[in-house]
Structure formats: C-alpha cells, structure tokens
Image (cartoon, rainbow, N blue to C red):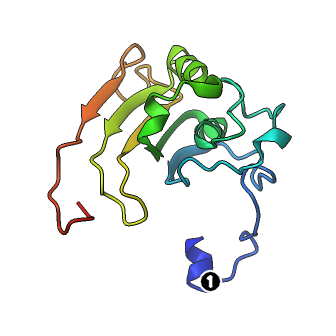
Amino acid sequence: MNLAIRGIESSQIALGDSFQNDQHKDLKADFILANPPFNVSDWGGERLREDIRWQYGVPPKGNANYAWIQHFIHHLAPAGIAGFVMANGSLSANTAGEGEIRKNLILAGLIDCIVALPDKLFYTTQIPACLWFVSRDRYNHKFRDRHNEILFIDARKMGRMIDCRHR
C-alpha cells in the first residue's frame, strides 16, 4: 500500500482481497505488524468456511476480526512474532464462536501480550482499541521462557487529550 500511494512501481504490487485471494499463500514471516480494519462485516466469510487458515475455529461471517488474527498466525514462521491493532471487542466477544477461537489461541500458547489502549487514539475511530502480540515460539529460544504466561498491560488511562476528539 505504501509503495502504491507513493507511485512506486513493482511487480509485487497487486490489487486484491487478502481473504478471498491470498497473494502470498506460502509466505511464512518472521515478523508481522498490522493494523487491519476493525469489525468488517462484509469480508466474504460465508465463502471461506473451510479455509485452511481457520485452524483455531471458523471466524463469524459477520465480523472479520478473528479472520485477521488467524490470517496473521497462519503466515507466521515457526519462530515468528506478530503485533497488530484490534478493536477492544476482540477481547470479549463471545458470539458466533469468537470466545471459542480466543480460548483455542490461548490453549495453543500463542498469545504473548495484550495492551488495552485508551479511546480517541486514532483519527479514523474514537473507540478504544487494543494491541495483540502473538508468538509461535514462546520457549527459551530467542527470549526468556514465557510459554505459560500472558502479559496484560492496561494503558487505558495513558495519554492526554489534544482536542475534544483526539488523545
């Protein structure tokens, strides 16, 4: 996206839909950093019920949050780490199997850290968001052994208002 905005040509840039036409099916990344769109309801989930990426549960067709999470995890290398922004609802939603997917991610030992952020932090939405950090290898291979731990950081009260709509 960044290259396209700046008019930089590349044979690697393609228009598409990350869910319906994954351009990098075999990609296994060491690091993933992402800010996917929150709570997308028309992501085409009804056409992807049997997708290989849904290892921890089929995401609801009415909300793409857990589709994004599993999409990122699917593309992580064996020692890969991902960090991404999600709507706060991703931490507590229990409808359409989201709670079960979250439980499966925890039981699989993938969730490394969750950071609760304050509201009014982004220009595109005033709702509070959170940061998810997931790691495929949480044993003592790159960092300290943290395989039975999840770090929770409450940053909801941090920051200062710069105007009535933005923190």
* Residue 53 x, y percent position in the rendering: 73, 34
Q: Quadrant of residue 151?
A: top left
* x 65%, y 39%: residue: 67
Q: Quadrant of residue 160?
A: bottom left
Query: Count of labels shown?
Result: 1
The N terminus lies in quadrant: bottom right
**Residue 113 versus residue 140: which sits nearer the camera?**
113
Residue at the extreme bottom of the image, as rendered: 7
**120 up-or-down from 157: above or below:** below
Q: Considering depth in this image, is 56 or 32 the residue closer to the camera? A: 56
Position above or below: 140 against 78: above
Q: Is residue 14 above or below residue 84?
A: below
Q: Amino acid at mark 1?
A: Ile
The residue that label 1 is drawn on is 8
**Disc 1, SS:** loop
Which residue sits at x=80%, y=51%? 20
Residue ID at (30%, 57%): 120
Is 61 situated left or right of 87 in this image?
right
List x then y, in percent, for residue 124: 43, 64
Q: Nearer the viewer, residue 30 or 74?
A: 74
Give the x, y percent position of residue 139.
44, 19
Label 1 Cα neighbours within 10 Å, binned few <14 / some 14-19 / many ≥20: few
On screen, residue 82 versus residue 119, left or right, reads right
Q: Position of residue 133 (x, y in %)?
A: 43, 37
Asked whether 67 or 126 is in front, the reply is 126
Relative to 97, is 22 on the left or the right?
A: right
Query: Can you see residue 112?
Result: yes
Q: Residue at x 56, y 47 (%)?
A: 39
Q: Is residue 68 visible?
A: no
Image quadrant for the C terminus?
bottom left
